[in-house]
Image: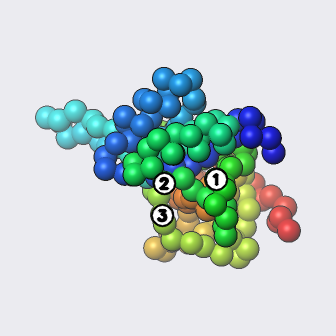
Amino acid sequence: MSSGEARWYAIRVFNNQIYRVKEEFEKLGIRTYMALKTLSAEPEKRARRVQLAPSLLFLRTDVNTLLSFKQNHYDQIMVYRKPDSTEPAPIDDGEMEMFILVTSALDGREVEVTDRTFDFKQGERVRVTEGPFKGAEGIIKRIKKDRKLLVQVSGVVVVAISKIPGQFLERLPQQN
């Protein structure tokens, strides 16, 4: 991979600075993504948007720009890195597209973020064929007695989607 190639990366932003850091990246022309969820409002209150995964920001940039930003903001951000390495871990475009699809559908209302790890080899791989999550691919897993579709960004975050009717799911071949 050349250092000038734009890829998706994940960073953790500290001290409630995520909106400021997001704005700084956007001023540099860098695409960012932060998963948000709309909380239902009570009749006398307005609906509000909150982060699905607090402090987690995704950016599409080249590794040199990311490392330069990190050097200038060393105490404000943590870059997700490759296992057993100091290099930033690029995120597969397909995983990122799937994450954006499921966290942006229905304003994130049917999605929950989990930091638990799962043995994905036991679950069945499926694709959603209808509804707001159409096109999403993931693994079916039981969590708290409820069947959910899990979509992951490897090494960063797993999101779980509930309330997908079985007839909207199609089995996919297992990956080796």
Q: Which mark is residue 112?
A: none
Outermost residue, left side: 44
Q: CA distance from mark 2 to mark 1?
A: 10 Å
Rendered position, 2 above or below 82? above
User: Which residue is identified by label 1?
Assistant: 88
Q: Could you tell me the amino acid type at mark 3?
A: Thr
Q: Nearer the viewer, mark 1 or mark 3?
A: 1
Residue appearing at x 72%, y 43% in the figure? 93
User: Which residue is identified by label 3?
Assistant: 114
Residue appearing at x 17%, y 35% in the figure? 45
User: Which residue is identified by label 2?
Assistant: 78
Quarter occupied by residue 173 = bottom right
How many numbered marks are there?
A: 3
Crowdedness near tag 3: few (<14), some (14–19) or many (≥20) residues, C-alpha within 10 Å? some
- Which quadrant holds the C terminus? bottom right
Question: Which secondary structure, mark 1?
Answer: loop
Rendered position, 98 above or below 151? above
Question: Which secondary structure, mark 2?
Answer: strand
